[in-house]
Image (cartoon, helix red, strand yellow):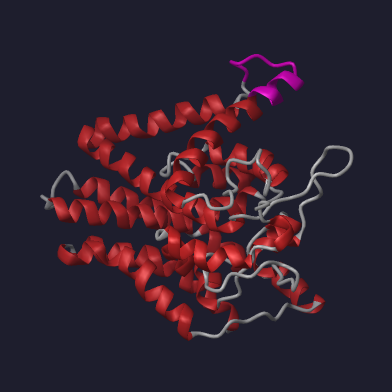
């Protein structure tokens, strides 16, 4: 019965569905749920640091329930996006409703699209990796698969990593630097992979080229079937989900850094190079993404078996609450800067 807690991860897309069904002021229910109601629950519910024992890990790895929860997000996410875009052709929304529902659907795509794609992208089976790439389509963020798996996990908590926020960098600055640098990094990684394989730019192995074509086709099909306005809303959904992702990226490694060894290389990524949170609500809503320290320590671990490490830097709040705090830089710096290990803080 305890495993049923992960059903709470469906609460954000269900909030978006509620907004789509009821309309009016309910169009804004999803952002209120995600960044007001959930943070309140995070403050009220206990923080749990317990880890599974070896027997429990074995049982959970054999239980298909945890994988099924991820797979069901595929029809759920595309169903929500499709419903909203299709409804534009027959329902006359007010401007406020359009704004609210675009943000709401974008949050659902970010939380249950990109986040689940992140989990599946680290799996070993090819078909799960394909599912990950498909889930990134409505976010228009397919390059994330390349940059995250071949770039971020290698360069996390270094100046070379676009997805690691620097000390005293605001989240607003980070949105721009991370988005543009990650896209450029994904292309650089792709071109390097092609060069090593002695393949040309137009090779079938150029995933970034195919991702570009797929995303343009996605928008083109929407424009053809539902009109250019619907395609514009689809872009708005993608931008919203990308901002959600980048805000999560911001808090995951903010101010943390790896030292260089005598050889000039960075020390190995360890449990101290990512922020960890054991707040229950954030953990289940985001499929244990908040135990990010262990994820970087061993990225192939499935979400249901991620562990807490005492040496990991701890966030005072869960991820949803921390994302909200990051939007107020002076408050964020006042709370987080003093929690950064002394050896990682800039001199002076």
User: Across the whole image, how many numbered discs are drawn on residues?
Assistant: 0
In this view of the protein, which residue sits in the foreground, 86 or 189?
189
Quarter-of-image position of residue 66: bottom right
- On the picture, is 95 further left or further right than 101? left
Q: Is residue 227 visible?
A: no
Q: Position of residue 141 (x, y in %)?
A: 48, 40
* Residue 145 vertical position relative to residue 322 in the rendered view, above or below: above
Q: Foreground residue, 257 or 161?
A: 257
Give the residue at x 70% y 69%.
Answer: 305
Residue drawn 47% across and 81% down? Answer: 43
Residue 192 included in the magenta stretch of the image: yes
Residue 16 in view (yes/no):
yes
**Residue segment shown in magenta:** 191-203
Q: Is residue 213 magenta?
A: no
* 233 to the left or right of 53: left
Q: Is residue 263 left or right of residue 219?
A: right
Q: Quadrant of residue 312?
A: bottom right
């Amino acid at each position: 019965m305890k495993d049923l807690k992960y059903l709470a991860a469906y609460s954000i897309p269900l909030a978006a569905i509620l907004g789509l069904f009821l309309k009016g002021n309910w169009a804004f229910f999803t952002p209120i749920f995600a960044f007001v109601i959930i943070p309140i629950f995070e403050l009220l519910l206990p923080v749990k640091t317990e880890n599974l024992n070896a027997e429990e890990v074995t049982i959970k790895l054999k239980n298909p329930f945890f994988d099924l929860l991820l797979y069901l997000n595929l029809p759920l996410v595309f169903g929500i996006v499709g419903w909203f875009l299709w409804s534009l052709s027959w329902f006359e929304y007010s401007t406020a409703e359009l704004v609210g529902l675009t943000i709401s659907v974008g949050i659902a795509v970010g939380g249950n699209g990109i986040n689940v794609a992140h989990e599946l992208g680290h799996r070993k089976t090819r078909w799960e990796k394909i599912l990950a790439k498909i889930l990134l389509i409505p976010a228009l963020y397919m390059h994330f698969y390349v940059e995250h798996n071949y770039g971020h996990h290698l360069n996390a908590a270094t100046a070379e990593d676009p997805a690691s926020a620097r000390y005293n960098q605001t989240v607003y600055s980070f949105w721009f630097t991370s988005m543009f640098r990650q896209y450029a990094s994904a292309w650089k990684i792709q071109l390097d992979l092609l060069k090593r394989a002695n393949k040309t730019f137009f090779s079938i192995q150029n995933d970034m080229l195919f991702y570009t074509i797929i995303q343009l086709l996605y928008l083109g099909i929407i424009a053809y079937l539902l009109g250019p306005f619907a395609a514009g809303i689809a872009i708005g959904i993608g931008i919203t989900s990308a901002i959600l992702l980048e805000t999560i990226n911001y808090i995951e490694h903010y101010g943390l850094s790896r030292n260089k060894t005598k050889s000039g290389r960075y020390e190995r990524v360890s449990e101290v190079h990512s922020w960890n949170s054991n707040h229950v609500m954030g953990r289940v809503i985001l499929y244990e993404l908040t135990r990010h320290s262990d994820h970087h320590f061993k990225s192939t671990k499935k979400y249901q078996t991620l562990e807490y490490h005492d040496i990991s830097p701890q966030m005072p709040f869960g991820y949803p609450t921390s994302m909200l705090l990051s939007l107020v830089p002076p408050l964020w710096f006042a709370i987080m800067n003093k929690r950064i290990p002394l050896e990682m803080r800039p001199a002076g």
